[in-house]
Amino acid sequence: MTFTFAQVFLAALCFYFLVHSVTCLAEIIHLKRTINEVPEPLQQKIPLAQHQKAAHYDISRTKLNWLEVTVTTLLIVYLTAGNGINSISDWLMNAVGDQFAFHWMLPASVGFIFVLIDLPFCWYKEFRLREAFGYTHQSRPHWFKNYLLTTVLGWLTVLPILWIALFVWRNSGPYWWVFGWAIFALYLVFSLNLARRLVYFFYPNRGETAENENLKKAIDALGKKAGLSVGEIRITKACDKEELPPAFAFGHRQNVKLFFRRDIYERLSLDDLKAVAAHALARNLSHMYFQAWFMCAAAAFFVFAFLAWFAPQSWFLDEIGFRVYGPGPYYGSVLTFALVALPVLLFPFRLPMDAFLRHLIFASDTFAMKHTGLKVTVDSLIELFPSPMRHSSVTLGFFDLLFSHEPSLMSRIHYVQNKYEALQQAEEEKTLRNDSLTVLHQLENVSAALVSKQEQKVKEAEARDARLLRLNHQFEKILVDRAQYDPSNRADHSLAQYKDPHYEQAMKDLSVDNRHHPMYGKSLAQAVSALFFRLKQCIKRMTPAAKLKTKDSEPHHEEKVQQSVPVEVPPVEKYAVQSVDPIVDLTEASDKTASCPQTQDLPIKPEETEQDSTDSDTSVHGFDILDVKEASSEVVQEPETTTSDETAESEQTDTINAEEKNTSSTALQEKAENLTDNTDNEPVSGKNARRLKAVKTIAQRQRELYAKTHPDVR
């Protein structure tokens, strides 16, 4: 979809009208909402009545501005779409007839129409409304005189300039727009109120030197803090106060020349003058006024380049209702287009430029706040505000951007306060960050020290291990060398094969047949019954009557033993484990005696065999041998109690063996009787009873064997 130039122009015109209308409406609503409350920073300086009066004044001006924008928009529509410019062009062409005069008078005529339309609005805003609110004391003739001098004479002054521009345009060929841009850039110096400041730049002696020593010291301190030096402080003339700011400066950081407006110098205090000087130095460091002129000149450069491209063409003029005469270039029509349509088309691009200029003003306020403090900056802004106040201090920022190009008082105060809070927060965050970094660095240093210390320990340990390993290698080498070169070194002899001394006995024990063991083939019931029978026998022997009966029956028993035929008793080795118990040694001695040839050759009677077998059922085959084993095990478990008994029994056994070799059986019988007597004297208990029974049994068997082997002895 393509758009014609007329459609683009109408869209830009609608945007222009809507933005101004919405902004004016929002400003009126905002002023009505804040009319009954004075801002907190201004409560001590501005009373509520004055604040309300200023609000009503701004509401009336805003309504008038809205009406002016509406009328201007309708005039532009009439001039373009309503063939207004075409009517003026036809009248001028018929009246003048000269083409050059036509191109000169057409833009002048259109400009005069805009001046006439602006006259009633300007008169009502600048005189009638101020007079109604008491903000001016001028008379009506005096105001009209000033208006004619500034507006009408200004328009008359533009006419020769326009004629010169057209002449240069026609005679300069294709570079006419460069000369036109240069003339416009020069005109911007006067329109931006820079001309009077340039006078003080080229003629600084126009202002007188300030003789305030306190002010000089304060400015010097401010310059040192800001990193610059102020060479001169001067006061401007009183007649120049309408065209100069409160303070301005020239120079860049070294030998800066500072100028105060006279009324400001005489009215403000030392702190306020210091803040105003900070503003001026900030604007000088940022080259605010030069940047404003440069931006406007750069925008004008592109506009003139655009016009140079459009001047030989007529299609865009035809689309918006401009009639052209003759061949191009169409100088008058292009200049008229620049007066009527170009401000509307460039309106979206003008807003960023104005916003940038406002940013420079806020930057100067921030600079003053940093070097003089928040309170001093706010107080100086309030003091610079005209008193009595003519405009409200709470106007919208966008409204100021459209109509006044400078922010309102409260906008500047709020910006400075917000900036101060942001700086304080940034300073606190910086402090916290520095503290955290300090702690982090300390922790890193401590950890690095610990790591280095640990690494040092590891290195020392590695060095120590390496040194020990080197010493071990050296020692091994020395030993090897000694072993190789020692003349006394001989070959080692082979060791004899080791033989276990108990190997034969162990093999013999393994080859023993246990089928002749008393418990071989017996059941658990028989073992339990034999155990109970044995316990009954022990209980009977422990009673005093049983002991007396035993003593009385000993002679009869001896006679019976003498008359009986000895029975061969199987050796105890077959049933008992080898032990150092003397009771077992006695058993082995008796076995050796029983194995004599004399005993083996003796005949055995059947009756005696049955009687002996009957007795042996309760003695030998009735767990006598087991009692001997239990007695030996009890002796091993209680060495402190049975040590003396074992020693005596071993001595007696050795004595019996010696006498047996010498064939003295009498001594053996006496030793057995002594052993029996010694054993009877001990206290009777369960274990001792079994031990006593075993000893008695062995002694009885020795006596029987002795009787068998020595039948001659009675």
Image (cartoon, rainbow, N blue to C red):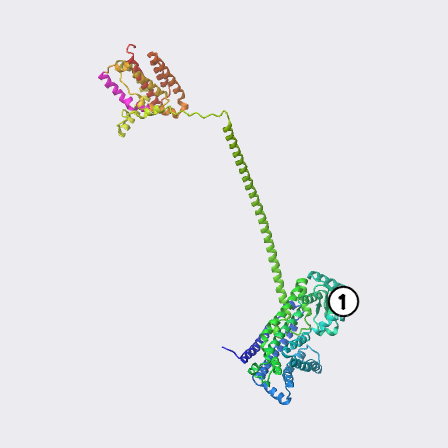
Residue 234 drawn at (x, y percent):
75, 68
Residue 56 placement (x, y as % from top left): 63, 76
- Could you tell me which residue is drawn at 74 percent across and 73 percent down? 238
Where is 97 relative to 589, above or below? below
Against 206, is 597 above or below? above
On screen, residue 484 above or below 255: above
- Pick whichever, 193 or 404, lies toward us: 193
Q: Say how many tags the image has.
A: 1
Query: Mark 1, residues whose alpha carbon is within 10 Å: few (<14), some, or many (≥20)?
Result: some
**Dividing the image into 4 quarters, which one contains the C terminus?**
top left
Magenta-span inclusion, residue 110 = no
> Can you give x and y, in whole percent of width and height, for residue 525 in the image?
26, 29
Q: What's the residue at 62%, 61% (across, down)? A: 423
Name the magenta segment's main secondary structure.
Answer: helix
What range of the chain is rendered magenta?
A: 605-627
Name the residue furthest bottom.
Answer: 94
Reading the image, the residue beneath label 1 is: 210
Q: Is residue 291 visible?
A: yes
Q: Quadrant of residue 313?
A: bottom right
Q: In the image, is 646 to the left or to the right of 464?
A: left
Q: Quadrant of residue 171?
A: bottom right
Foreground of the two, 686 or 404: 404
> Is residue 613 inside the magenta stretch?
yes
Outermost residue toward the left?
Answer: 606
Residue depicted at 74% across the width and 74% down the height? 239
Q: Amino acid at mark 1?
A: Ala
**Which residue is at the front of the view, 644 or 487?**
487
